[in-house]
Amino acid sequence: MVSTTFSVLLALAAFVPLSSATVTSQFSLSGNYTPTVITCPANQTYIRPASSGLSPSEQAWLSLRRPNVVNALETYLNNVRIPGFNVSAYISALKANESSAPIIGLTMSGGGNRAEFGAYGVYQALDARYSPAWSSKTGGLLQAMTYTTSLSGGTIANTALGVNGYPDLQTLIANNNFNLSVSETALAQVAGKAELGYPITVADIYGIASTFYGARSIFNDSVDTLGFTWSGVQFQSSFANGSTPMPILMVDEVIPFGLEGSVSWNTTNGTILYAANTSQTYYEFTPFEFGSWRGRVKAFLEMEYLGTPMSGGVPINASVCLNGYDSVAFCAGTGYSAANVWLAESTTDGVLGQFAKRSKRSKIPYPANEDKLEQERVRSQLVPNADELGGLEELVKENLTTILYA
């Protein structure tokens, strides 16, 4: 499932691995964005087929979550008071067989910053802790949910909520999670990953820029946000005891037009990379696993070992497993990186839908007013939050140019 190159293996071989370790906290062993090489644990199943169903870890978590779902449904239904519906009988039936409790989920759509903040609005409207929502009888559904999922812009909201145990929205606001500034020092943390031999992509840059404040801890403001791991969510206290839903980040596999397996197609404006049929591979990041139920993969990898060079379902080198590659920033950036299309259109040679490096030796001339037109068009896609972006847009562009075009 996880491929690598010879150069990566050579780079990793230069590091002395730490002793075998398993996830026991929300943070990477390094405490920051840089992965750590560890000795691979013995007798570990790293990859399982999707045909085996839900993982044992998720099944165990569901057994903790279901009683909370039933209790939340009881509270919600008693508040809604549906005419002719016997809440007591329904809840009694569910408590007698909790496995029959309905699975309720919230999907946070894509669409950049508008989707992100739209997701926050829907979240608050379904939260029993928000009095207007409770009075309107929409509040309480959140507490009865089993999963929240997201892609693209909605991923940033799902990430911030998931790593912080689904707080009420006002707590996130008070915690400054909507401060969109990010320092060059934070973006420079990609260097540690690069030194291990892994390529730096727009997912790293955009993930750090988007989650540096977005995923900031409401429990301890002294921790490095970039040290959060997605596998570490399972050790967030409210998640571990089944009190809150499970956050899942969704990612589409994109194979450029013309390559084997591609389901993309060309338009008059360039290559548009969209899933177009049921054979497309859709990946998901859960706190327990990374993988896909369909498409080319149909398998899952233990999330804490994401990034480990593997072949045939086992590590290539028993002394080289990675810890912390599943940074929350990287996982969120992977889900959100479609936003780079907006930046790519204004910072590359005008190639739409794919991130093309610009040659230092020769540049395709821009049409008249191209820069201004692209700038305005990109800004319009960020409405209604463009005025709140501060210097983030320019900072990300500058770093993309420096790192990706180097």
Image (cartoon, grey):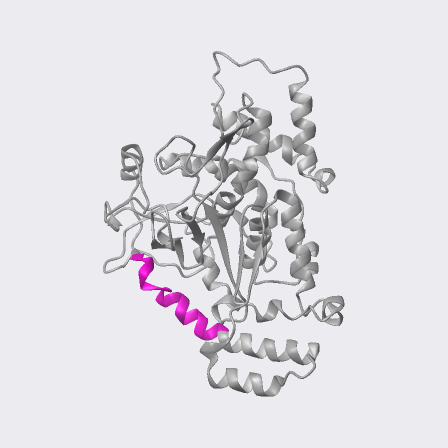
Is 222 in front, or is 362? 362
Find out whether residue 38 is within the magenta segment.
no
In percent of width and height, residue 260 lies at 34, 35
- In the rendered image, the vertical position of residue 201 relative to residue 370, given as above or below: below
Residue at point 61%, 44% (across, down): 111
Residue at point 52%, 37% (across, down): 205
**Secondary structure mostly seen in the magenta stretch:** helix
In percent of width and height, residue 146 lies at 52, 67
Judge whether residue 50 can be spotted in this image: yes
> Would residue 145 be found to the left or right of residue 181 on screen?
left
Is 266 in front, or is 391? 266
> Would residue 55 be found to the left or right of residue 236 on screen?
left
What stretch of residues is rendered in magenta? 48-65
Q: How many marks?
A: 0
> Would residue 320 be found to the left or right of residue 253 on screen?
left
> Would residue 52 be found to the left or right of residue 369 on screen?
left
Find out whether residue 52 is within the magenta segment.
yes
